[in-house]
Image (tube, grey):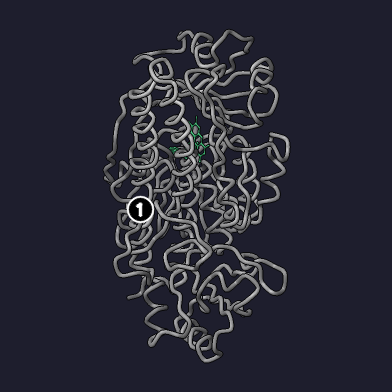
Amino acid sequence: MAHRYQVIIVGGGPVGVGLSIDLGLRGISCAVIERRLQLSNIPKGQGLAQRTLEHFYFWGIADELRAARVMPQGHPIGQVTVYENLMSEFWHAAPDRVLLQPYYFQANERLPQYETEKVLRRRMAELACVDSYLGWTATSVEQDAQGVRVVASKDGTEEVWEGDYVVGCDGGHSMVREQADIERSGTDWDELVALVVFRSPELHEALKRFPDRSGYRVMHPDLKGYWMFFGRVDVGEEFFFHAPVPPGATEDLDVPGLLYRAVGREFECEIQHVGFWDLRVQVADEYRSGRVFIAGDAAHTHPPYGGFGLNNGLEDAVNLGWKLAAVLAGWGGDRLLASYSTERQAIFRDVGEDIIGGWIRDDRRLLEQYSPDTDREAFERHFEEMAKGYGHRLRDFEPHYEGSSVVIGPPDGVISAHGSHTFTARAGHHLPPQKLSSGSNVFEEMGSGFTLVALDARDEAVRAFEHAATSLKVPLRTIRDTFAGGREAYEVRMILVRPDQYVVWTGDTAPEDVEQVMRTVTGRL
Ligand SMILES: Cc1cc2nc3c(=O)[nH]c(=O)nc-3n(C[C@H](O)[C@H](O)[C@H](O)COP(=O)(O)OP(=O)(O)OC[C@H]3O[C@@H](n4cnc5c(N)ncnc54)[C@H](O)[C@@H]3O)c2cc1C
């Protein structure tokens, strides 16, 4: 007999497990089918953005995640950029994500992905409506008008899972994406990159020449803008490193030589792991095909420059989770499901091609045009500008859904990863946090459904929203407060926020047809 769930998630990496938590907390039954029994011990996926920690807060595990941090509390997360090698006299330690802190409710974090996954898996195990099937490999996915059917096998035994929807969170080689005939496209930089994990107290000592940081990006004039990059796993011994290597390189590559080149001298090190990845951006053309969805690396892969992969994958999960739950509960329409693909695909296209591709192209241009050997003064000026520009690209990363069919924003809005950070509440954008008169933050008072923030708003206007929500069976919580005490920075008295903390509508009074607004933002128009 087939197992029966509302949602079947193929792949129990961080994105699949995150999605199961988001759905499980909304009371949706789901199965997570994962082929691995053990977590990978490669310390990748370390940089978790402020926005990602907001997800952990709503999943009830922000404190557990911070407690799992390997680096000492307070050790800065940013990075140093150096020219040629780590012994160079040319370097910068420009501030990056820390500048964005006021616009998010949670601070960013840094820990190896396997520690993050342990925290996620423990939370998943607490949820009664989520079942995980570890050691099972999904082999086929089918759909028809009624539902989906997934076949998986374990130790020669085959079983069937049936559900309303299936989400492929099964990584870059996604079987679900392939079986749903979803194409991918993007720039292939045609470079092979080595990933090395090693221990070296001596390197830790050498890095004391810089202010405390967690990552060290080496721009080498021979590498055409591709990075050599050191990341700390702890503070004192363990590092990961990636660098371009000749095509066809294998594990017998001269790894110490590669490390010495990036460091600028020989040093004692114990190599623990050597792997390889291809430097290319690949984004699925659609994130949905009928009842089949894809999320995380199954939908988008790219070089791990800037730490976008896991963060974007978890944002996919949060974007999709409430939409699936709304449709399954009967108050969300099909346009809501369609908006998952249009919102998230457009963002990642920008991330892969403009932001990551932009870094490579900018660095390449600088290294080709300027050298300290030919014109030191011009090189120093441009190198400093470039280092600041790195921070600028991170600050400019403000994914927003202006122009989405389920957001009532500016008529000419276009969904984009590029934007600006401000305390003004804008339809299509992440709600900036603000303190309430009670002393708590608006984020602490939001519900799991929609939230109406009403700041000295007229009673009839608030009641109009509450009435429309009740008649359409949309869960809505109202937060009432004064239009003062810092909250006037929102520049508007009424803010309608959807379950993933994105604003969908703003105004000072109720719109003429409140029901139409509620229908639009729940995908029922
Ligand atoms: C060196 C490096 C550094 C990185 N640094 C960062 C960073 O700082 N910040 C960041 O955000 N990201 C970073 N990333 C990217 C990040 O690691 C990935 O984006 C992340 O792992 C994606 O998670 P996922 O759950 O989508 O996919 P995966 O982690 O690949 O998980 C997919 C899961 O699906 C399972 N699976 C696959 N096929 C099947 C099947 N047929 N049946 C059952 N199970 C299946 C797999 O076993 C796996 O567990 C880095 C990556 C690398 C390589």
**Depth check, front residue: 321 or 468:** 468
Visible residue check, residue 517: yes
> Which image quadrant for residue 280?
top left
Residue at (36% x, 33% y) in the render: 362
Q: Residue 139, image x and y in percent?
A: 38, 39
Is label 1 within 8 A of ligand 1 (CB to nearest ligand atom)? no
Q: Residue 507, image x and y in percent?
A: 45, 79
Residue at (31% x, 25% y) in the render: 190
Visible residue check, residue 334: no
Residue at (30% x, 62% y) in the render: 145
Residue 87 to residue 117: above or below:
above
Residue 97 to residue 188: above or below:
below
Q: Residue 18, image x and y in percent?
A: 54, 50
> Which image quadrant for residue 443?
bottom right
Q: Quadrant of the C terminus?
A: bottom left
Residue 304 to residue 129: above or below:
above
**Depth check, front residue: 180 or 357:** 357
Mark 1 closeness class: few <14, some 14–19, many ≥20 residues within 10 Å: many
Q: Is residue 70 left or right of residue 259?
A: right
Q: Which residue in the structure is indicated by mark 1? A: 292
Q: Secondary structure at mark 1?
A: strand
**Depth check, front residue: 516 or 483:** 483
Q: How many marks?
A: 1
Q: Amino acid at mark 1?
A: Val
Residue that extends furthest to the bottom in the rendered view of this protein: 460
Residue at (36% x, 44% y) in the render: 176
Q: Residue 319, image x and y in percent?
A: 45, 58
